[in-house]
Amino acid sequence: MLYSRFVLPSSRTRAHVAFTDRWGGFSSTPFSTLNLALHVGDDGTDVAANRGVLANTLGLNPEALRFIDQVHGNRVIAWDADGAHDPHTGERTESVTADAHVTKTPGLGLVIMVADCVPVMFADPEVGVIGAAHAGRAGMVDGVVPATVAAMRELGASKIQVAIGPSICPRCYEVPTDMRAQVSSVEPVTASVSREGTPALDVAAGVAEQAAREGCEIVDFSSTCTRESSDLFSYRKDSVTGRFGGLVWLEELTTHPRKDA
């Protein structure tokens, strides 16, 4: 059910971060078993059950989970109790086509779904602002990480911590020579070589570089490769497959420490 889970505490809130694995759900092969995605061909009833059992495991209301329609871009939306809006203008939106989302509303679980791309969780628990981004190759190049940071700062975030979840490693992410050149012209740290000695990309390294450049503190950086792990979904390995999730949510503390204590 859970690949990892941890808490980023502060005196005001706790920011909870979790990454799921592929086990403990209801989906059948090739989506076995904890597929969270509706767009991959899985039975919708099974996906709904998977999302529900995940929410219950994490102590969240299933209706509080927030999903977005990911398209490998850099659009960010913000959530509050009334729905989605533009984090910069406050204008309401019905479209949840985006690759990142942010909130300062406790109890809302921001979900990113991946099967090789990089799930990135952001939190400023002291201020009480969180974010989650889907950073594939294209989204990383287009700046989804700095866009998420900017949106969080619009909501008041200052000291942002980042957790980078499991993704495909450069040993397994072989790409054409011209693609490596194009991506590394944006983020040089991404240029790599596969285990066969062919051109490859390290997208997670690009994500980490961008987060650090934005002044974020990287508090967790998974070394697990999705293609090499039997516990995670991998599109590069299986093509038709499910999606695991990265989640972040805020828990508001009911009592605060006394300033004179």
Image (spheres, grey):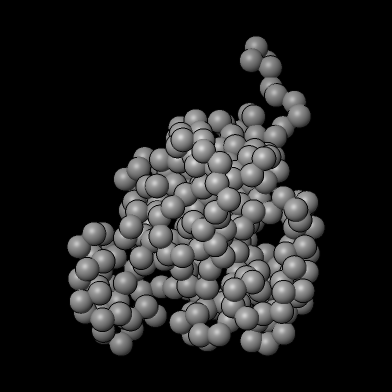
The residue lying at 76 percent from left, 56 percent from top is: 62
Task: Examine the image and state in which quarter residue 29 appears.
Answer: bottom right
Of residue 222 and residue 244, the one placed in the foreground of this image is 244
Q: Residue furthest top?
A: 260
User: In the rendered view of the protein, which quadrant contains the N terminus?
Assistant: bottom right
The residue lying at 33 percent from left, 57 percent from top is: 142
Task: Examine the image and state in which quarter residue 126 appears.
Answer: top right
Give residue 220's position: percent from left, percent from top.
Answer: 50, 53
User: In the rendered view of the protein, which quadrant contains the C terminus?
Assistant: top right
| 186 versus 213 height, above or below | below
Q: Is residue 223 visible?
A: no
Give residue 27's position: percent from left, percent from top.
Answer: 72, 79
The residue lying at 72 percent from left, 74 percent from top is: 44
| 193 versus 12 height, above or below | below
The total of numbered circles placed on residues is: 0
The residue lying at 51 percent from left, 38 percent from top is: 91
Of residue 95 and residue 249, the one placed in the foreground of this image is 95
| 165 versus 157 height, above or below | below
Of residue 218 and residue 200, the one placed in the foreground of this image is 200
Give residue 88's position: percent from left, percent from top.
Answer: 45, 37
Taking the image as shown, residue 67 lies to the left or right of residue 235, namely right
Taking the image as shown, residue 83 lies to the left or right of residue 176, namely right
Taking the image as shown, residue 138 lies to the left or right of residue 34, namely left
Give residue 137's position: percent from left, percent from top.
Answer: 36, 67
Q: Is residue 148 visible?
A: yes
